[in-house]
Amino acid sequence: MNPRTLQRLIGVAVTLTALFVGGYLIAWKWVVCRVEVPPGESLLLTYRGPFPPLRSVPTAPRGTLVELDQRGRPQQVGILQNMLGPGRHFINPLEYKYERIKDTLVKPGEIGVLTAKFGEQLPQGQYLADREGQRGIQRKVLTPGRYRINSYAYDTEILPVNACVKTNGGVQHQAGDALLIPAGYVGVVTNRSEDLRTSARRGTLDDVLQPGIYYLNPYATQIDILSIGYNETTLSVEAEVGPDGKPLYKAIEPVGVDSAAPLGRDPVYRKDKGIWFLSRDGFDIFLDFTTIWGILPDQAPDVIRRFGKSSEEEQNVLKVVEEQVVLPDIGSICRINGSRHGAVDLLIGDSREAFQTDTSEELEASLKQKNMTLLFGLPRQIYVPAEVREPIQRSKIATEVKLTNEQKQLTAEAEGDLLEAKAKVTLEERRVAAETEKLFASALAEGEKQARQIEAETEKLVAELDAQTAAIQADITTTIGEAEAEKVELTNAAQAERYQRYVETLGGPEAYNRYLFAENLPDDLRLGIFHAGPGTFWTDLRGFEQALLGKLASDSIAPGSSPDDLPASSPSVPRPASVRSSDRR
């Protein structure tokens, strides 16, 4: 083959391949097969069969979905169970048909119940599907969230979370509230069918649900919410009311002509209020009664079994228990025990207490037999007719009056004793005051006497001390005077001795006088000797000054002594002139 022809064939093949690939990817794959699924939606696929139809594929039986091989490819024509979620998908429209399905949204406070349209039939006697692949209502429910559910395979029923509640016990569930059983309540569980997974039997279970959040299938479970704790039940007597709205009273006829006026009138009591019965002696007795009773968690299932209705109508079980059990038991027990006692016995303390004790114990036993708890039961007030009550009241009044009079007498005696004691106290106070004043005056006089004596002795001692002080002072003055005189005498003697020593040291009185003369010369005295020249008078005076000073020095020093023998430490003894002559010219 010509190379040019071969090259052209290759070019054509490449062009055709490029056109095919481009057309497949762009025109077919991206434009025809591309499907965009937004959030909140899914695609439900139906398999049409292979394209091109090179092989035959059977159709899925009615009531079933398409079976898949190990690689996940459909083996039948029909609806696929799995759906495609949000995103971009490429689906061959020649093989598949698709449908957009919105996601199922279960909001808070809701549940979703699924019913499978396809799958195997349930066994005989079972109407809830406990596993996947079974047709019918699924036992497992959908909790709040978003789900991708095949609408051809399942029906979805959105119900409130309290759809399983039969008896709400007075609990009000708000929209969106996921709390099924609040605090103070329990849930009594009643299974509508047996659960094969947990082997739970059908009927009311002994175990209760504690307060909390539960997502239960209303087709599988029924919940009775029951208040746990104690409740009060009170029966009170009421009087008949006339047209004017005021209570009606019955007249009391006094017994006998000399009988006292009645103490009061009894109202006309209603026999349908409170508790009414005839006493052993035939009197009408009315009674107020209060009881505190309750239901504990372990008693709740039995209460539901006994008093829960089988209908779907909501009811207050506690109200039913009160009306059917508590009130009838209180009435019957009080009437039976009351009819065993006379009217007077119900007023006297010991017999009345025995009636109360017997009634409470029998009521507790009766409620315990019905699996309930009694905290206490108390007859609060017993209304006895006046014809029975008044004699006892008058007797009690007379006794109280007697006791009062006796007490008044004791009080009067005590008051007399008190007055006598007060008089004695006043007399004793006055006697003590007089004795106190006497003792005070005596003590005051004795104190003044002792003070005067002490004062006189003190003055005497002061005088003696003054005399002794004066004598000592005189002695001191005399001694000081004598010392001063002796001082003067000794000073003068020392001065005289000192001058005598000066005179003796200088060689006589004349030498001493010359010494004083020289000493008293002014310090700034200057003598000037002028030398006029040889052969004159002034020339002969040369050395006169030295000769004069030497003469004075020799005259002022005694023979056999030197100038250094004079006392130099005495400030009053002057130095000889020869010592200071070096300072003069």
Image (tube, grey):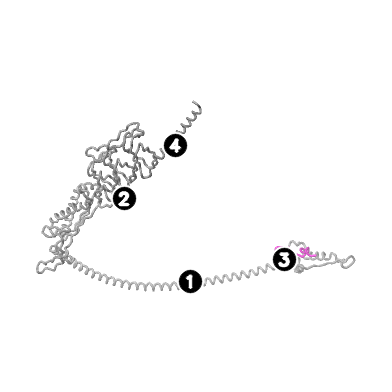
- Element type at mark 3: loop
Amino acid type assigned to the residue bearing label 2 in the image: Asp
Question: Along the polypeptide, which appears first: circle 3 or circle 1?
Answer: 1
Residue numbers of the magenta segment: 566-585
Residue 570 colored in magenta in the image: yes
The nearer-to-camera label among 4 and 2 is 4
Q: Residues within 10 Å of mark 1 (few under 14, many from 20)?
A: few
Tell me if label 4 and label 2 are in contact, CB under 8 Å: no
Q: Amino acid at mark 1?
A: Leu
Q: Which residue is mark 2?
A: 177
Q: Earlier along the polypeptide chain: callout 4 or callout 2?
A: 4
Q: CA distance from mark 3 to mark 1?
A: 58 Å
Residue lying farthest to the right in this orientation: 535
Q: Earlier in the sequence, mark 4 or mark 1?
A: 4
Does residue 511 appear to the left or right of 140 in the view shown? right
Query: Which of the two labelled residues, at mark 1 and mark 2, occupies the earlier sequence position?
Result: 2
Q: Which residue is mark 3?
A: 573
**Circle 4 sits on which residue?**
22
